[in-house]
C-alpha cells in the first residue's frame, strides 16, 4: 500500500484470550475458546448528534473518544472473560427480559467509564501527595513539579512491570502485540497471513500505552502554568486539569502518528513506543490467528452487515484478500 493512499484508521484492544478491533461504526471481538475454536462478539458504536459534533472539536474529541472507548471496551472484556475458559454450550443460560439485558449492558459500560475515571484520579493525585512529603526538603514550584512527574512515571512503570509478571496479563500483552502487528500489516497493504503479520513490529504510534505516557509528559508542562502553593490549591488544580491533560495528550498522540514517517519528527513518538516494549510481547502464531480472525470479521461486517457473524466458516484466501484491500 502506498504511503499517500488514505486508509481507514482502525483501532483495537487486547482482551483475555482475544482481540477487539473497531472501525467507524462497528466493533468485533474474536476470542480463543477452551476447545480451540474462535468465537465472536459484535457491538455497534452508538453515538448521538451531540457527540458527533463534539468529536470534531480539537482537545474535546479526545475526552469523548476515551469515555466511549472505556464503556464499549467493557462490553467486549466482559464477553471475553465470560467465555474464554468454558466449552461451547456450557455458557450460563439467561432468562432475562430484553429490558434487563439493556440495563446490564448500560451498567457494564458505566462501570468501565467509572473505573477509567477512578484510575485517572488515583494516578494523578497520589504522586502529588508523594511530592508534597518532600516539600520541606525540596521546595519550589519547578522542583515539586519535576518530583511529582518522577513519581508519576515511576508509578506507571512499576504498575505495568508488576502486572506483566502474572501469567494472565503476559498472555494479554501477547495479544496486544498481535493486535499491533495486524494493524501494521493492514497499513502496509500486505495480505493478512500469519507469516506477514508476524514480520510486522509489535509497536504502533496510536497505542493507548503511548497515550498514558503522554499524559505524564504533557501534564508536567501544563502544571508549570498554574500555582502549586498552597497545597490545597495544587490538589484542586490537578483535578480540574484532568480533562485538559487528557485532551491535549490525545492531540499529541494524533500528531506523533501523523508525522511518524517524517525523518526527524518521527522521534516525537519514541517515548510512547518505548513504553510499549513493556505493554506488548511477541505473540504466538495461534494468537496472531485470533487477531487476524477478529480484524477480517470486522471488515466483513463493515461490507456485508452483521449477518456474517452467524457464519462460523473461516474466510477463504480470496475473501481475505478482498477485505484487506478495501
Image: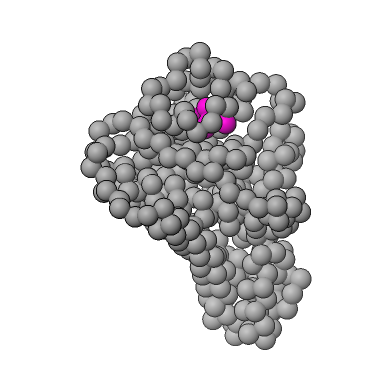
**Residue at position x 50%, y 43% in the image:** 43
Residue 273 visible to an observer of this rendering: no
Residue 300 sits inside the magenta stretch: yes
Write down the region rendered in magenta. Answer: 297-302
Q: Percent position (x, y) of residue 265?
A: 74, 41
Dividing the image into 4 quarters, which one contains the N terminus?
A: top right
Residue 274 sits inside the magenta stretch: no
Q: Is residue 172 left or right of residue 219?
A: left
Q: Which quarter of the figure has residue 134?
A: bottom right
Q: Is residue 304 left or right of residue 34?
A: right
Q: Is residue 284 left or right of residue 193?
A: left
Vertical arrangement, residue 257 with respect to residue 192, above or below: below
Dividing the image into 4 quarters, which one contains the C terminus?
A: top right
**Residue at position x 71%, y 29% in the image:** 6
Vertical arrangement, residue 48 with respect to residue 233, above or below: above
**Residue at position x 30%, y 51% in the image:** 94
Q: Percent position (x, y) of residue 95?
A: 30, 53
**Residue at position x 54%, y 81% in the image:** 133
Is the magenta region chiefly helix, strand or loop? helix
- The extreme top residue here reads 318
Q: Is residue 173 left or right of residue 253?
A: left
**Nearer the observer, 200 or 172:** 172
Q: Which quarter of the figure has residue 213?
A: bottom right
Q: Percent position (x, y) of residue 167?
A: 31, 47
Vertical arrangement, residue 114 with respect to residue 298, above or below: below
Q: Percent position (x, y) of residue 20?
A: 47, 40
**Nearer the observer, 317 or 242:** 317
**Nearer the observer, 33 or 268:** 33
Amino acid at each position: 500500500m502506498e504511503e499517500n493512499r488514505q486508509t481507514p484508521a482502525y483501532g483495537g484492544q487486547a482482551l483475555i484470550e482475544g482481540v477487539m478491533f473497531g472501525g467507524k461504526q462497528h466493533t468485533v471481538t474474536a476470542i480463543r475458546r477452551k476447545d480451540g475454536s474462535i468465537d465472536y462478539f459484535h457491538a455497534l458504536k452508538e453515538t448521538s448528534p451531540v457527540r458527533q459534533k463534539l468529536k470534531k472539536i480539537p482537545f474535546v474529541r479526545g475526552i469523548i473518544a476515551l469515555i466511549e472507548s472505556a464503556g464499549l471496551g467493557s462490553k467486549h472484556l466482559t464477553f471475553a472473560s465470560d467465555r474464554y475458559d468454558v466449552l461451547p454450550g456450557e455458557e450460563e443460560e439467561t432468562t432475562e427480559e430484553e429490558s434487563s439485558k439493556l440495563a446490564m449492558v448500560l451498567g457494564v459500560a458505566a462501570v468501565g467509564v467509572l473505573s477509567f475515571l477512578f484510575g485517572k484520579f488515583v494516578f494523578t493525585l497520589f504522586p502529588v501527595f508523594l511530592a508534597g512529603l518532600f516539600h520541606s526538603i525540596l521546595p519550589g514550584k519547578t522542583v515539586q513539579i519535576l518530583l511529582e512527574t518522577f513519581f508519576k512515571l515511576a508509578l506507571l512503570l512499576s504498575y505495568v512491570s508488576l502486572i506483566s509478571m502474572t501469567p494472565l496479563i503476559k498472555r494479554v500483552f501477547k495479544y496486544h502485540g498481535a493486535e499491533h502487528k495486524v494493524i501494521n500489516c493492514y497499513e502496509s497493504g500486505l495480505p493478512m497471513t500469519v507469516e506477514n503479520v508476524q514480520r510486522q513490529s509489535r509497536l504502533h504510534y496510536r497505542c493507548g500505552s503511548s497515550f498514558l505516557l503522554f499524559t505524564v509528559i504533557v501534564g508536567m508542562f501544563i502544571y508549570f502554568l498554574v500555582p502549586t502553593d498552597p497545597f490545597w490549591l495544587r490538589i484542586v488544580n490537578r483535578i480540574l486539569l484532568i480533562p485538559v491533560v487528557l485532551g491535549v495528550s490525545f492531540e499529541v498522540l494524533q500528531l506523533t502518528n501523523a508525522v511518524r514517517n517524517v525523518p526527524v519528527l518521527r522521534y516525537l513518538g519514541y517515548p510512547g513506543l518505548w513504553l510499549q516494549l513493556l505493554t506488548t510481547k511477541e505473540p504466538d502464531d495461534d494468537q496472531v490467528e485470533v487477531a487476524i480472525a477478529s480484524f477480517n470479521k470486522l471488515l466483513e461486517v463493515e461490507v456485508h452487515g452483521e449477518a456474517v457473524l452467524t457464519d462460523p466458516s473461516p474466510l477463504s484466501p480470496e475473501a481475505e484478500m478482498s477485505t484487506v484491500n478495501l
